[in-house]
Image: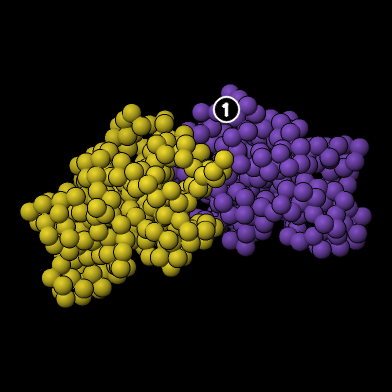
Chain colours: A yellow, B purple
Amino acid sequence: MSTKPTLYTCLSPALLHLYELKNAVVVIIDVFRATSTIASALHNGAKCVIPVDTVAKAVELSKKINGIAAGERDGKIAEGLEHGNSPLEYTPDFVGNRTLVLTTTNGTRLLHMALDNKADTIITGSFPNLSAVCNFLLQQNKNVILGCAGWKDRFNLEDTLFAGAVINRIKENYTIHCDSSLTAEQQYLLVKDDLYGFSPNLTHYHRLVDRFGLIEDIRFCLTEDVANVLPLYKDGMLVAAK
Amino acid sequence: MSTKPTLYTCLSPALLHLYELKNAVVVIIDVFRATSTIASALHNGAKCVIPVDTVAKAVELSKKINGIAAGERDGKIAEGLEHGNSPLEYTPDFVGNRTLVLTTTNGTRLLHMALDNKADTIITGSFPNLSAVCNFLLQQNKNVILGCAGWKDRFNLEDTLFAGAVINRIKENYTIHCDSSLTAEQQYLLVKDDLYGFSPNLTHYHRLVDRFGLIEDIRFCLTEDVANVLPLYKDGMLVAAK
């Protein structure tokens, strides 16, 4: 009997140190909205997305390479930037063949933490590229950490729901002893037939919709496979894997 | 309109710093088994339970006050102690009118963290004293933090299920904007009709049953109101509140 690789779900960046990343593929999950935006930009023809941890770096680097500086803090466009973290902003006309330099509150921060923790491979996932993520993981056949970005280290359910969607599709190929993964899949099964209808129950929905009216962002971020690329981190940038 | 107090669920000790404990009642939850054992001991007539963080302290203090030194590390009786963390061990004959000095991997550690974070009031909760916990919280009418002890900072589902049971009973009296609480209640509703039947899905079940055969402990720890006292922390000890 061959041994299957393991799969764990990490519910918050503050728990990442509890998991062994060294030989694992880490899936960075920030459904609202960083990893949905990354999928959208790459699907619409961006050359690459460079995740950076500060607004200053986004501005400086984008000037140097003639890229698009973008990002958010607390759910809105970060001060000093012209472009935010909406997946709908990055149309083919705007982003095609350009480089997006992106900084966000949770998702890009978790990605840098995974780097610091020596992850073997880093990809990003969200409902718009669910199938691409699952196919990549199955093809790699390595240990998997599903890393939920949460909100300022707090648990959020939408990232966990995406983890549950992945688990539901690929679990037969992994050894899973992890209550977080069990919970993620059960939650996903409970609401999968109407993710959008369920979304007003999420705290982050109110942050985005009540304050900023971003209901169309929510809809995009919860729709499976509408930007079905595989963002793979390599040499400081996320590129669509062939 | 009067403002309701808030309620949050903290899924791991490693997330406790994200919550404001100062004006809150913190419920320490370690279903398998510390807080079930505390309820059992007090229900069976123990004078009090003194939670300590090391085996050495348990031994030293219990000698001084002629108490019972007890505790576990990694699920079994800690080296140097004669009594462990099984709620069934503390019968009225054994524990009646005595003091239990208890050290455990997760539950007593979280209690000390809540103390360090200046919690207003600390109580312990588990299925055996579910009703007593809910009644106390409603009577206090203060902010509530449901603190899950987890397993070495990892999320575990049984503590979260207990949080969900509390939320399900008292939620009308609180303002709840917290995805952890939403998830906890949904998970509880999913399995509440047969907690015991569901328990083999829990990672901690295997730690306790496969390794140590503690199936009767599991059954006790998942039975509502079989030791329905309210352990209240005061001056270094947990006593049954009148």
Q: Quadrant of residue B208?
A: top right
Residue B13: percent from left, percent from top: 58, 55
Q: Quadrant of residue A241?
A: bottom left
Q: Quadrant of residue B241?
A: top right
Quadrant housing the N terminus of chain A: top right
Instruction: Please give the chain letter of the residue carrying mark 1.
Output: B
Frontmost residue, A86 versus A233: A233
Residue B62: percent from left, percent from top: 87, 57
Residue B77: percent from left, percent from top: 80, 50
The residue labelled by disc 1 is B192
Q: Is residue A184 above or below residue A104?
A: above
Residue drawn at x 12%, y 60% is A97
Residue drawn at x 46%, y 40% is A173
Q: Is residue B81 visible?
A: yes
Q: Outermost residue toward the left?
A: A93
Left of B181 or right of it: where is A98?
left
User: Mark 1 packing: few (<14 Cα in 10 Å), some, or many (20+)?
Assistant: some
Frontmost residue, A9 versus A71: A9
Q: Is residue A204 visible?
A: no
Residue A83: percent from left, percent from top: 17, 60
Q: How many marks?
A: 1
Q: Outermost residue toward the front?
A: A1
Residue drawn at x 77%, y 48% is B76
Residue drawn at x 48%, y 59% is A23
- Amino acid residing under circle 1: Lys
Frontmost residue, B233 versus A113: A113
Regarding mark 1 in the picture, which secondary structure is present there?
helix
